[in-house]
Amino acid sequence: MSATRHDLVIVGGGLAGLTLALELRQSLPGLDVAVLERAIHPVPEITHKVGESTVELGSWYLANTLGLRDHLDEHQLRKFGLRFFFGAGDPGSGGLERADELGVSRLFSVPTWQVDRGRLENELARRVQAAGVTLLGGARVRRLSLNNGARRVEFDGPVGSGALESRWLIDAAGRTSVLKRTLSLARPNGHDINACWFRVAGEVRVDAWSDDADWQARTGGRPRWFSTSQLMGPGYWVWLIPLASGATSLGIVADPRFHDLDAIRTRERASEWLQRHEPRLAAALDDHELLDFGFLRHFSHDCERLFDADGWALTGEAGVFVDPLYSPGTDFIAISNGFITDLVARDCAGEDISVRARALEVVYRSLYDNSLALYQGMYGQFGNADLMALKSTWDYAYYWSVPAFLFANGALARLASDSVLRNALLTGVGLNRRMQRRFRQAPGDGRATPGRGRFFDQKSIPLLSRLNEQLTETLDGVALMERVTANLMRLERMAGHIENRLAHPGAPVGDDEQELLGAFPGLLRA
């Protein structure tokens, strides 16, 4: 079968594949890019895909790197941060003001969004085609070959069979991941978690779960339902995400040590599970039409290799996936797409990229493993409001001090060749691993703290507001290194204060500790 020749072929035209195609064309306007996608665009809105919530790194990528800020502002929802509720309880026990709440009273500086994936991917498809990308919809890959440095993809399409050949082949096909299967690259990561998710018609507004005036006033009149709301309990959490198309995305994510997948793998069982564990949400869903339902067993996964100098790579869920608690999916798409674009550009310029490909693999692996540490062995503590308030403060501070800061300043790919900057990253990685071990060792696994109506306002922590605002500053050279060094020194002090609180919960709180961790009433105090 004769084949059409391109410089680069992407298998998979979802979020990962389309954003990569757009980034490549923006960076390398002369590159001939083709995308094979099973669906035919435009896809339906409220598409049956998870990954609607974005955080700062991924939002920065969409809005600034790819230039999608206009679409996000006009056609998606501005997100009111992540918001955690502990001890949400039963509707018969009073309003949601009785729960402990962890979130923000006001927006941080860097915007994030809730994205309807169908709506976003349709816009991306329009933009990549306008940029000159060949987008072949309705295509099913039949065979993939990497022989002798030639990439060949054979597929069936709406008008018959076809084949593409290219110098570069990128797998962005999600969990079907044809390249991962062809090269036997799949490997487990030790994070055994299951999930189900579904969407309902209409808005599920947590603000309606209380008429308490003081509780309503906590957020200055801004509706909480614009947040990614997460109902927390021992071994599980439940998300609520509003979509601009008018639907609400929901999901149950659970550790099988505490909640077996069989208890949530059908809509009926998931409803029964919610009635037992989150009856307030179950009651709120009674009047909403179910739009879809899905589940995944062992959804967190790893990959032996992601970038190869011989002309292939994986991005998005085709490669790795960590955990959705902090919504990092788009973050890792942004990082892998940036690394792939860097390698392709250097390869096109005639550079030998063999050493750089291995170095970027090490950097990506370090970021992935460090992110995985946030979740491994922690699900049993998800009902502990006090510990999670401390942990989330650390997790946000580390994220904004190191990976998100480096990404916003275009410095992540520099880690492959800048040993000083790379050593700074490794220092941060070591600090984070140390703190995640402390959190895992804290007492209370599998137990929940009853809701006491407390509000852990992350916006009241001076350090978090400062770190988030600093993401908007553009630094380079010496100034960039000085900022990273200052951030790491601050994280070291923060780590000491957290370890002191964990070891001596009744100790007085000093000024530096209050600056870095806040002064939440009753937090880990005797």
Image: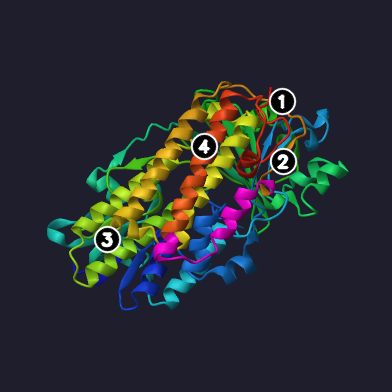
Residue 450, disc: 1
Labels 4 & 2 near each other (Cβ < 8 A): no
Using a 10 Å C-alpha cutoff, classify the residue at mark 4 as few (fewer than 14 neighbours), some (14 to 19) or many (20 or more): many
Q: Kindly report which numbered mark, 4 or 2, lies closer to the viewer in this rendering.
A: 4
Q: How far apart are marks 2 and 3 (CA)?
A: 44 Å
Instruction: Kindly identify the residue that appears in the image at 52 percent across and 40 percent down.
Output: 493
Q: Kindly report which numbered mark, 1 or 3, lies closer to the viewer in this rendering.
A: 1
Identify the magenta region: 460-480
Vertical comparison of 124 with 48: above or below: below
Q: Label 4: which residue?
A: 495
Vertical comparison of 378 with 344: above or below: above
Q: Which amino acid does label 2 sit on?
A: Leu
Earlier in the chain: of badge 1 and badge 3, it is 3
Q: How far apart are marks 1 and 2 (CA)?
A: 24 Å
Residue 169, disc: 3
Earlier in the chain: of badge 4 and badge 2, it is 2
Q: Kindly report which numbered mark, 1 or 2, lies closer to the viewer in this rendering.
A: 1
Residue at disc 3, secondary structure: strand
